[in-house]
């Protein structure tokens, strides 16, 4: 296997590598792979966010019933700060969507 190109997913560009540029067929295969990869990464990101929601629910249950004062003290400030940041961003985005509705 020889490297024929470098792929930049963010800009969706293909930079030929070596003396011979990829053929049209190779370029098409690379673009198809990039599309599949991008789709898979987007799906994975959504699944990770849904998993985060589950973890937040488990954290609430843990804080309600199973936690010691020392354990709670260890995580409270970090959780509150991250939840505040998340709440701020989500609220702002929701307001923007509401205001931009046709």
Image (tube, rainbow, N blue to C red):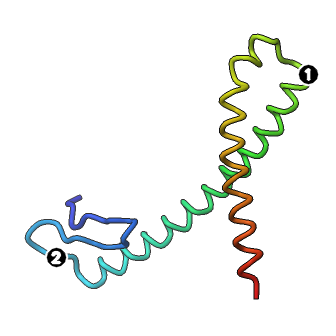
The residue at the point 50 percent across, 69 percent down is 36
Give the quadrant of the C terminus: bottom right
Q: Is residue 28 above or below residue 86?
A: below
Q: Nearer the viewer, residue 92 or 30?
A: 92
| Residue drawn at (20%, 60%) of the image | 2
Furthest toward the bottom, the residue is: 102
- Residue 96, given in percent of the width and then of the height, sits at 70, 71
Residue that carries the numbered disc 1 in the rendered image: 65
Q: Relative to 93, is 62 above or below?
A: above
Which image quarter: residue 56? Answer: top right
Q: Is the C-beta separation of discs 2 and 1 under 8 Å?
A: no
Q: Position of residue 4 (x, y in %)?
A: 21, 67
Circle 1 packing at 10 Å, graded few (<14), some (14-19), many (20+), is few
Q: What x and y, as percent, mark residue 95?
A: 74, 68
Q: Nearer the viewer, residue 64 or 86?
A: 86
Q: Which mark is residue 21?
A: 2
Determine crowd level at label 2: few under 14, some 14-19, many 20+ residues with C-alpha closer than 10 A.
few
Mark 2 and mark 1 lie on one chain; the one further toward the N terminus is 2
User: Where, by quadrant of the figure, is residue 66 drawn?
Assistant: top right
What residue appears at the point 23 percent right and 58 percent down from the top-left corner?
1
């Amino acid at each position: 296997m020889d490297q024929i190109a470098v792929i930049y997913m963010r800009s969706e560009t293909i930079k030929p590598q070596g003396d011979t540029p990829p053929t049209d067929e190779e370029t098409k295969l690379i673009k198809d792979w990039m599309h599949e990869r991008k789709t898979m990464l987007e799906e994975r990101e959504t699944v990770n966010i849904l998993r985060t929601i589950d973890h937040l629910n488990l954290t609430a249950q843990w804080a309600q019933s199973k936690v010691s004062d020392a354990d709670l003290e260890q995580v409270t400030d970090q959780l509150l700060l991250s939840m505040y940041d998340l709440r701020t961003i989500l609220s702002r985005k929701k307001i923007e969507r509401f205001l931009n509705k046709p």
